[in-house]
Image: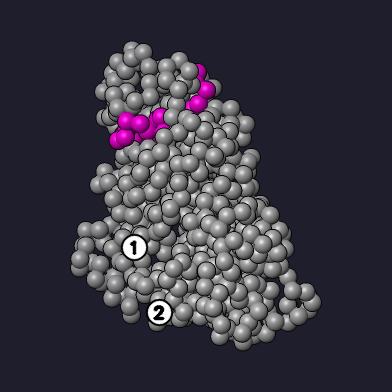
Amino acid sequence: MRLVYLWIRAALLHPLRSLTAFFWLLCGKRLRARNRFSVLIEDERYRYEKWLQKNARLSEDDRARIRAEIEAEGDKGPRFLLLCAVGVEPDQQLILRTVRSLRGQFHENWQLAIVCDDKSLLEEVKDRRVKVIVPSDVAAAVSKAAYVGWLKQGDELAEQALYRFARAAKASPALMYCDEDQINRKSVRRHSHFKPGWNPELLVSCDYVGGLSLVRSDMVTPGTGELAQWKTRYGLLLRLGASLQRGEVAHVPEVLYHRYVKRFIGPNSVRPSTHGVNHEEVLRSFAGLGDNVDFEVAEFGHIRPRRRLMDGSGSPLVSLIIPTRDMQRLTKNCVSSILHKSEYRNFEILIVNNDSSKPAALKFLKNISKHPKVRVIDYPGPFNYSAINNFAVTQAAGEYIGLINNDTEVITPTWLDEMLAQAMRDNVGAVGAKLLYGDRRIQHAGVYTGMGGLAGHGHRMLKAKKPGYFFRAHLCQYVSAVTAACLIVKKSKFEEVGGLDEEAFKVAFNDVDLCLKLQAAGYDNLYHPHAVLFHYESKSRGKDLKGAKRERYLSEAAALKAKWGTDVEVDRYFNRNLSLAREDFVL
């Protein structure tokens, strides 16, 4: 009944947009229809309350199974040291809440070190695992533990938290972290943060790892009393981030950590990046950043490193490939925006003419081919996006190539500088831009596999000035795929993985397949939110709704599932707790 009420409310408040959603539902585009409705219905608090009713507590059978498993193993497991610096104003009641949650853990091999100069703080706590230590004793405590974590007074852990981490620790990861939510003095829980897998690029701009994070003790460099501070934890993660490989980090996708807050902080108020860390100093120690990086405060207060390119002849040539068939107005607008708005100038534009026949289009192609930065090449025959672009790559003179739709338009003049600087990194595969619809809602902010059983655009329909889910639409980060509507990749890497698949993915999902091949080859695909373009989606080739187009689309969708298991695998940069039926990161 509540869902019916929400749909009726949306229809009354937003009739035209509701009709658009209903249209997509009738066309069989259920994911797109749900996503359209999602921007009309804000009900995440209710969803999390319902989720907690199902998932907040273990059943007695679960408890019995965990105890039996621990008893059967017959060892204490790894020792976890949890540091809690309380400062000059410790709150006795909050500390006791934290202690109670630890004493209820299934995994019992832990120590809570409350870092404070007042050793009489917890005289009434009769548990040898809880100690008050002075800052100078922290290093000695770290040396006796397998893993070190950080808590604040009032924070609580789910009863199975350390048990889950102990299981993850069997592979000896350098870092472990879990999902989290917030809890207040009345023990009300809200605002879950379901985190992605290891994403050091996202960590640079945002402390997305948060708590509870446990670092293997040999990775911790003791020596100062600051080690117990919360800001030290984030500084350590930043320093580790450049060197840790995905296999060295374990993300436990369960809400095991409850962050104490006096007042609830919505997911659009994620922790700003610094926490007292000298962010620029820490980031400059990252391998590959060095001095060729500027640091800026981004729109929502996060710090971002902006990579710079060399000026003049030292900058690599980029070949921007734009397929077209007629559609003179769209193509002219796209090419003109690139030529007149782009600050980076060492590029060529390859317009691939796929059987244009309209006089206006032919006249435009003839005239624009006279521009020194533009070449027009012909590719006759049926429209095959993959084959067209693969052919154009063989004709490209650039060291880097850009796949550009003719229905895009440049917004930010530095778009090519920003994307190329990222694509030049050895570990980076494809780099994708932030794309906006004409009404400035987000069309593309990274592609996540599994959505709708295939792949979806995260944050689609989010207003460009809205923060969205933990600001992820606006932060540079690794993603599994990006759209070929605007994609930059090194030509040699494109050729290394065989380019676009001309047989299985003639029109749809060829960009997803390309990015997943790059990812399988060991490269990280990257979404860059500070390179922004308009994308008047599918205006040039139409929709895949009926007839032969629909048959072709269904065939390509089946091929994607068969090759990459998008209907069964969870994207490493998504989270299994979030809905795959929508694109706005909700339960």
Residue 26 in sight from this viewpoint? no
Q: Answer yes or no: do the residues labelled 2 and 1 have beta carbons within 8 Å?
A: no
Q: Which residues are magenta?
A: 396-418
Tell me the SS state at disc 1: helix
Report crowding for label 1: few under 14, some 14 to 19, many 20 or more residues within 10 A (C-alpha): many
Quadrant into which the C terminus falls: bottom left
Residue 183: tell me if it is visible: yes
Q: Which residue is mark 2?
A: 185
Q: Amino acid at mark 2?
A: Arg
Report the front residue among 458 and 300. Answer: 300
Camera-side mark, 2 or 1? 2
Q: Residue at x 63, y 82 (%)?
A: 127
Q: CA distance from mark 2 to mark 1?
A: 32 Å
Q: Residue 504 location in percent, x, y?
A: 56, 42
> Which residue is drawn at the image coordinates 48% and 35% (left, top)?
422
- For the N terminus, the image quarter is bottom left
Place of residue 222 in the rendered image (x, y in percent of width and height, measured from the top left): 62, 55
| Residue 225 location (% of width, % of height) | 55, 58
Residue 415 in the magenta stretch? The answer is: yes
Q: Residue at x 47, y 30 (%)?
A: 292
**Viewer-proximal residue among 99 and 533:** 99
**256 vs 468: above or below:** below
Q: State the mark number for residue 230.
A: none
Q: Which residue is the site of mark 1?
A: 38
